[in-house]
Image (spheres, rainbow, N blue to C red):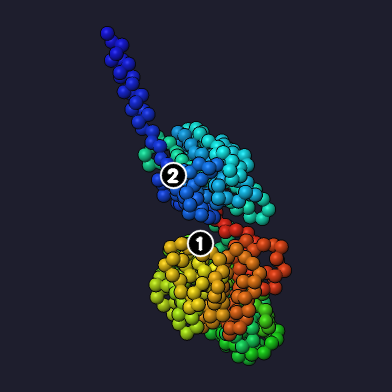
Amino acid sequence: MYKLPIILLFFLFTRNIYAQNLTKFLDELPIKTFSDGIQSVVANVNQKGNPITMGGIKYKKGIGLESTSVMAFLLNEKGVRFSAEVGVDDMGNDSIPLRFYVLADRKIIFDSGEMLPGNKPKVVDVSIEGVRRLGLLVLGKGAGYPKNIGSWANASITVNQADYPKTIPNDGEKYLLTPASSTLPKINSPKIFGAKPGNPFMYFIAATGKKPMVFKALHLPEGLKLDSLTGHITGAVHKNGIFPVELVAQNSLGSHRQKVVFKISDTISLTPPMGWNGWNSWAREIDQQKVIASSKALLNNRLIDYGWHYINIDDAWQGLRGGEFGGLLANEKFPSFDKMIDTLHGWGLKVGVYSSPWISSYAGFPGGSSNEENGFYSDEVRLNKRNFRYIGKYRFEEQDARQWAKWGVDYLKYDWRIEVSSAERMRNALNEVNRDIIYSISNSAPLNNVKHWARLTNVFRSGPDIRGICWLSEM
């Protein structure tokens, strides 16, 4: 007569235990915050914006990705199970296999092996009990930067705490490896500097040591002047030549002398430009206030004293075409672009912008070409940006270069799936303006064309976008 109540109590007790477990589909989480890969993952569609389809099967739920893809989750032993179906999307590249891994505290607990489009999706169903950090990694195989698209379809994490999973915090011990600066003056500027004849000359003496500091420049070529309080050397040199100059930085404790060479010719960027780029900090959310704030941070942390002079504004500043030259103007997030540049120059900083020869940039802002003669960026393009990542019928390299020169831009990041003809057109356009603009091409410049990149550009990047993925080393 007592068996039924005991069984009932056992049922209710175990039901209560299992009721604590909560299954969360990854597409229902703010999934981009867990993504450390480039491109970031997307929810419920593939990376082309179409339904997730693998092996002929369509999935309504899942995470679309492009290799290399990394997602990291902090579980702190609150996890129970991870499950998904994985594979290469049917719209993917049939020559680049993908391999899916589930990583748990430095151990591989699932390995899909190599997969191609049309392969039957593989089921993942693994225990994650006792796991502190969970990683979902997808790698492509092939030469260069092997990109392909795939999915974690119907992906879910079962946890026993309602507020998990969490993002991996960046709150570990910090190491300051740079030794403290001496209070004595020390000049850290480049020892050789290139500028074109007749163009505006901007050389900012970078010096550490106790402030205030007074600067001198001996044997300056004709046309240049020094501001002794800021260390800014400006003006223009109108003839080619190699000009040895001696710089002096002096404070109340002593002085430091440094010999430099100003080379006036057709060659600029004789040393690597150093500075800050806005994409990893702000991505599409960049605006004028954030640029100013980041510039002040660079100044306040005295990075400028070590030669960090460039403030480069990445994708998402671009507005519609117009103005004197019909070039790209700044959008509403930058209400006074020209005055902002003047302010940064006054602080001893140089300014860079981003552009692309495509109709639409990667972030979905106007690029350097159009299918409209006037360069109009229509709602059709804005709403379907991925479909307009190609070079349009009408190109505007010359108009844009003139606008940048008038503003006083010092650096261009030019970004697209790189081919030589577009790189050369922009090179020619920059050569025609009265401004020294460092020319950097971005997005995996193919090394088989390295002779062209060396001929046409000042800086080229042979790899993909990078982003710190600390969880890999800490797991």
x, y (%) of residue 405? 54, 81
SS at mark 2 in the image: loop
Examine the rendered structure and indicate whether residue 383 appears above or below residue 52: below
Q: Nearer the viewer, residue 190 or 404?
A: 404
Q: Residue at x 45, y 82 (%)?
A: 323
Q: Residue at x 58, y 43 (%)?
A: 118
Q: Nearer the viewer, residue 366 or 68?
A: 366
x, y (%) of residue 204? 57, 78
Check the picture and name the quadrant holding the N terminus: top left
CA neighbours of label 2 inside 10 A, class few (<14), some (14 to 19), many (20+): few
User: Looking at the picture, which amino acid does disc 1 mark?
Assistant: Asn
x, y (%) of residue 325? 50, 83
Q: Quadrant of residue 176?
A: bottom right
CA neighbours of label 1 inside 10 A, class few (<14), some (14 to 19), many (20+): few
Q: Does residue 214 appear in the picture of this structure?
A: no
User: Looking at the picture, which amino acid does disc 2 mark?
Assistant: Lys
x, y (%) of residue 390? 55, 66
Q: Does residue 156 appear in the picture of this structure?
A: yes
31 horizontally vs 117: left or right: left
Examine the rendered structure and indicate whether residue 97 appears above or below residue 456: above
SS at mark 1 in the image: helix
Q: Nearer the viewer, residue 366 or 233?
A: 366
Examine the rendered structure and indicate whether residue 403 appears above or below residue 297: below
- Mark 1 — residue? 387
Which disc number belongs to residue 60?
2
Examine the rendered structure and indicate whether residue 244 appears above or below residue 167: below
Mark 2 touches mark 1? (CB < 8 Å): no
